[in-house]
Structures are given as structure tokens and as C-alpha cells.
Amino acid sequence: MREIEFKITDKDDGRQIKDFLRDFGVSASLLTRLKQSENGITKNGGFARAIDEIRTGDTLKIRIQSRGKMPASSEDTLDIAFEDEDILIVNKPPFMPVHESRNHIGDALSNAVAAHLSSDENTAFRAVYRLDRDTSGLVLIAKNELAAAKLAGKIEKDYYAIVCGDIQGGGIINAPIKRLGDSIIKRGISAEGEGENAVTRYEAIKHSEGLTLLKIRLETGRTHQIRVHFASAGASLLGDTLYGVSSDLLYRQALHCKDVYFTHPITEKEMKISCDFPQDMENIIKDMI
């Protein structure tokens, strides 16, 4: 259960509780559950209705009950970049899926997070965004539904990729993406008016013979967007066997989510969280200039 306390100031004097909470980001469905749960909403320590008014100096409190449960695993430890009562940010290693699937039972990030939160933490797994299994880097997990709702679609991320080829400066790739044929996995560039709009911004950071380290910011979040866009430009990601060729330098696509930027869903503080490159990419980057 997550308890969140608000100290009412002059700007909210005389408002109804329901209006105050909705403006803060509480959804209609969550507000209904708060009203239906014992002491879901209290004012100055006592029971309060959603239609009650608040006054300057009042202390308003909501209690969000956890819902759902994740299957835990004790085999994986987490590389935690940040954690508080509302969010958990972990540096996911390559080769770990975010969610369980038919071929990955008990070895997903969701299992490791459940083990970290402990078996008595009855909560659903709420990854605010997903990384591919072989992509490494930061994943933000919301610990309650209010945090998840307020963060959805509002995270900025800096990816770093090592691509094959010599790319200078920076630029924008604006090309729609669609699923290829009957494949449930592979994507490709589509003709104008087909597929989903996809925009990728990039900047060259370092070079070595035949390779470029890029810093990448996505304006859209399509499946395999970075991999598809750079493969279509003749600069597939190093090690990406789905859209390029295999490499002896590393055994997965060279893609890492290194920085995330967001407004904290409860404190409303501007946040930036960063992590190091994984060792397989660092071994290549350290020799670049």
C-alpha cells in the first residue's frame, strides 16, 4: 500500500477533494477505488468524501492499495539505478526479457523485480516502457497505478548504439515502419501513407574504423525503431543479426538505454537517471576516438 499526503495551500482553498485529486493525476477508476476502500481518502486524520471541500492548511491523504501479483524469482539480482516509494529504475542487462513469455518463464526482469520487492509486496509489474531482450539499459518500473498513469508516455530516453559505417554529425530519420509479411517480429520501412509514423534523431559521438557510436533520441516509440531506421540507412547496428549481420565483437545488437529524463509522478521534481555502458559495448567504445 502507498500512502500519499498533501498539504493544502491557498491556491486549492475551497476545492472539492475529487477535483484536486483528478488534477494531480488520479484517474476516475482509481478515485472510485479510493472512495470504496476503508480510509482510502482522509482529511486531517478523519474520513473524507470525494465531494468534501478542502481548506488551506488541511492535510489530505490517500491510500492506494496494491493490485495483482508478479511471480518471483531469486536467481537474478537487480542493478538498481534509483528507487523510492513510487518508482524503481534498474539497469537491465542484455539477454534478459522484460516480461515472461513462453520461452522465458522465471528469468524475466518482472521476476527479478518481484523477488526484490519481496513476496509480501502484492503488486503488479508496471514497466513504463519496454526494452528488447538483447537491448541493455534503464527500465523504469512504477510501484503503484498512480505513478504508472502519470509517467506513461512522458519519459525521455537517450539511447546509444554502435552502428556499422562512418556517420558524421547528426540528423533525423523520418520513415514510417510496418510489420513485414506474416512475421510477428520483423519490421521494415513502409511506403508513404502506410505503416506507423516513426522519427529518430541522432548524433555521432565517437568513431573507429568502420564503426560509429551514436547518441539517439526517439520522437516516436515503434517496435525495433532504431534497428530498422539505421538498417534502412545502410548502417545496421553492430551484432544485429535480424536486420544486419553477426559480429565477432559482440553477440547482440549494440544498443543501450543510458539516460532517462522525467518528472517524478508524486514529488513533481525533474529527474535525470544515468547508468554505465555494459562491458561488451564498453570494450569497443574505449578504443574509439
Image (cartoon, grey):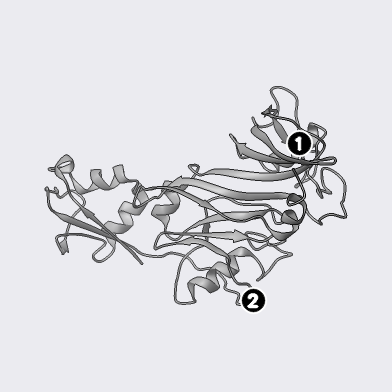
The residue closer to the viewer here, 107 or 275, is: 275
Q: Amino acid at mark 1?
A: Phe
Residue 211 vertical position relative to residue 102 in the rendered view, above or below: above
Residue 282 vertical position relative to residue 102 in the rendered view, above or below: above
How many numbered tags mark residues here? 2
Number of the label disc, if any, that sits on residue 51: none
Mark 2 near mark 1, Cβ–Cβ under 8 Å? no
Instruction: Residue 217: give x, y in percent of width and height.
Output: 61, 38
Per the image, label 2 sits on a secondary structure element best described as: loop
Q: Quadrant of residue 127?
A: bottom right
Of the image marks 2 and 1, the number of the one nearer the N terminus:
2
> On the picture, is 204 further left or further right than 67?
right
Instruction: Residue 39: give x, y in percent of width and height.
Output: 23, 65
**Residue that carries the numbered disc 2 in the rendered image:** 75
Classify the position of the C terminus by image quarter. Answer: top right
Q: Quadrant of residue 236?
A: top right
Q: Quadrant of residue 100?
A: bottom right
**Residue that carries the numbered disc 1 in the rendered image:** 230
Q: Name the residue at 80% across, 47% down.
A: 238
Per the image, label 1 sits on a secondary structure element best described as: helix
